[in-house]
Image (cartoon, rainbow, N blue to C red):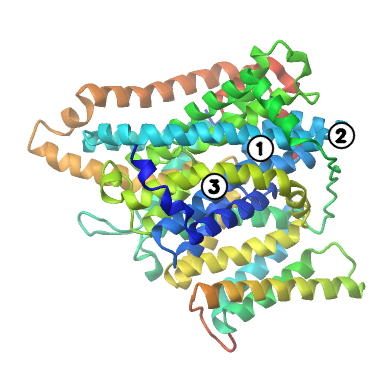
Amino acid sequence: MDFIFYFGEVFTLTSMLLLIGGTIGGLIMGATPGLSPTMTVALLIPFTFNMTPVHGLILLGAAYTSTVAGGAVSAILLKIPGAPANIATTLDGNAMARKGEGAKALQLSFIASLIGGIFGVFLLIFLTPILAKMANSFGYSHTFWLAIIGVTVIGSLEAGSVVKGLLSGCIGMWLATIGFDDIQGVKRFVFHPALGGGVNIIPALIGLFAIPQVISMFAKGRSQNNVEQIKVKKHPISKAFREVFSRKRAVLIGTSIGSLIGLIPGVGGQIAGLLAYDQAKKLSPEKQKFGTGHSEGVIAAESANNAMVGPSLVPLLTLSIPGSPTAAVLLGGLIIHGIFPGPTLFQQYPEVIWPFINSMLIGQILMCIFGIYIASLAARVAQVPQFVMAAIVLGLAAFGSFAVQQSMGDVYVMVVLGTMMYFLERFGFSAAPLVLGLILGPIAESNFVTGSLISTAQNGPFVYFFTGGLNILLVSIVYYQWGFLFGQNLILKGNHNEYFSTQISLRICRKHSNNCLLYQFYKTAI
Amino acid sequence: MGLSKVGNGLSAYMFKNMLPGVLISSVYLFFAAKFFGFYSATTIAFFLLLTAYDPASYSNMNSWVKRIIITACFIAIMYTLFAKILVVYTPRGMFI
């Protein structure tokens, strides 16, 4: 119950201003297609350099919370998901808006996000200290395997191809080796003096997420930005609250699935919304109404999205293993402020971490309040022409990358990585596994090398890394995952013309064929 | 297992569209930022990018004025944020 003692820090003037600013900014950025939560948080990190760690984390946490929810605005009003996590919201949300129920859909999405988000943060509050205590007993071999699990999970679920996803993770791990080796001081892949300090995580994150979006916007050429916005009529909020509380099944499904997905290292929010939507539809007595503007579809998807936010920080704060790509960016934000997540985090920095977690709780409430009232404004911002957005993001990326170490080398790294990522994405690779490889690579390497050194005084590295109950469990998870996914891909590939990113999505598509969720999104996105 | 085609590839049309933006960005970041100064180079690059990709006709005077105003507002915000609030010392070439 330590979190109660640190609530006061959240209600100081500076903290509240940052919380409100981060929430409003996050809602607007989230509503803008092309600006994902990950990119938003990555671009915000340079702005936190001159802040205290608490204030910096409060700003980043508020932005993380509200960008996830803000994506529902453009999904509902413009039929363009603000982020991949909002794909499922588009289906019923936009249909509701076309029936004249746009305000109702927005209110339902923010209220459902609030409920899911609060549940997720409470899970974070109560689970994190327990897992931190367990993690204290983790050895070097266990942490090594956990890092490998983090990269392989996201690599196998995120990318269009399992092999390419895992390759992306490997590329990320290779990038992490650039510079000087921590243990032996050996120079590795230092092609230019600017790389002597290695690849700094913040410019890398900005480059990997922002630059491909910028180039994508350039690639559309001088096209008109013809996005139809549906007008929003008023709807009483009390009715929306009553509707959400009457749809208990959808809320429960969304909240529990989102929380569970968030706890699994590396998975992220895209799957949570889709899975929750699919399960809500399967378990609903009104299945046929889904896709035509049914409130349960919006409620399940959005409660899952925000329920994922808190739990995605559980593996991050206790094991340094991000629960989502955005959590990976937050890890960069923590490291920049000199805070290294791990089992002793709550003992060493309680005055930083508990206010941060408490601020996420308050942030959920502010997200709901501001979301309902400024949704129309956010939708108007989403109609900013793409070429203007591209130029703004490029400028922010350049300044943000430079501000990290006041070095042009970081800007060059940002551009090179971003350009490389754009071309990789065009050919089926994904940024999320690459980022996780970049972040988890050093963790895996240092734990492997240290474990190997220790094992030479014991029974050798094979015994150290492959024996013992926890080691066997973790290794089994890695091999099971690879074997299961490779096997499933071979069987399912023949049942569908398209090849989708996740196994869950593959199952959905097998059942629904041309009407499946991801198939529709990819068709509209191309 | 990755043998199937994934990703959308790159068409000549897309490459032709992105080329001006990529060239302007490359010159801006690798050369102009140090030569002219970070803020000056950003101003020029921002304006050139807007001009290159704005679908409005180049003979329309209003669209030129709009682009100048957007560029001025953006640079003002960036200068306030980075130079005054965050106190980030950017490279100063010929100008700021």
Question: Label 3 amino acid?
Answer: Tyr
The image position of residue A441, as x and y in percent, is 35, 45
Q: Residues within 10 Å of mark 2 (few under 14, many from 20)?
A: some
Find disc 3 in the rendering and name its residue. A64
Task: Tell me how far mark 1 sits from mark 3, CA to CA.
Answer: 15 Å
Q: Is residue A153 above or below residue A419?
A: above
Q: Are marks 3 and 2 on the same chain?
A: yes
Rendered image quadrant of residue A68:
top right
Can residue A109 be seen here? The reply is yes
Residue B45 or A422: which is nearer the viewer?
A: B45
Lower sequence index among marks 3 and 2: 3
The image position of residue A188, as x and y in percent, is 31, 58
Q: How many marks?
A: 3
Q: Residues within 10 Å of mark 3 (few under 14, many from 20)?
A: many
Image quarter hosting the C terminus of chain A: top right
Q: For the point 41% across and 49% down, which residue is it?
A: A355
Lower sequence index among marks 1 and 3: 3
The image position of residue A8, as x and y in percent, is 42, 51
Q: Is residue B12 above or below residue A121?
A: below
Task: Tell me how far mark 1 sits from mark 2, CA to CA.
Answer: 18 Å
Task: Tell me how far mark 3 sits from mark 2, CA to CA.
Answer: 30 Å
Identify the secondary structure beneath mark 2.
helix
Find disc 1 in the rendering and name its residue. A110
Q: For the point 72% across and 36% down, which residue is it?
A: A107
The image position of residue A312, as x and y in percent, is 46, 37
Q: Is residue B37 left or right of residue A109?
A: left
Find disc 2 in the rendering and name its residue. A100
**Mark seen at residue A4:** none
Marks 1, 3: nearer the viewer? 1
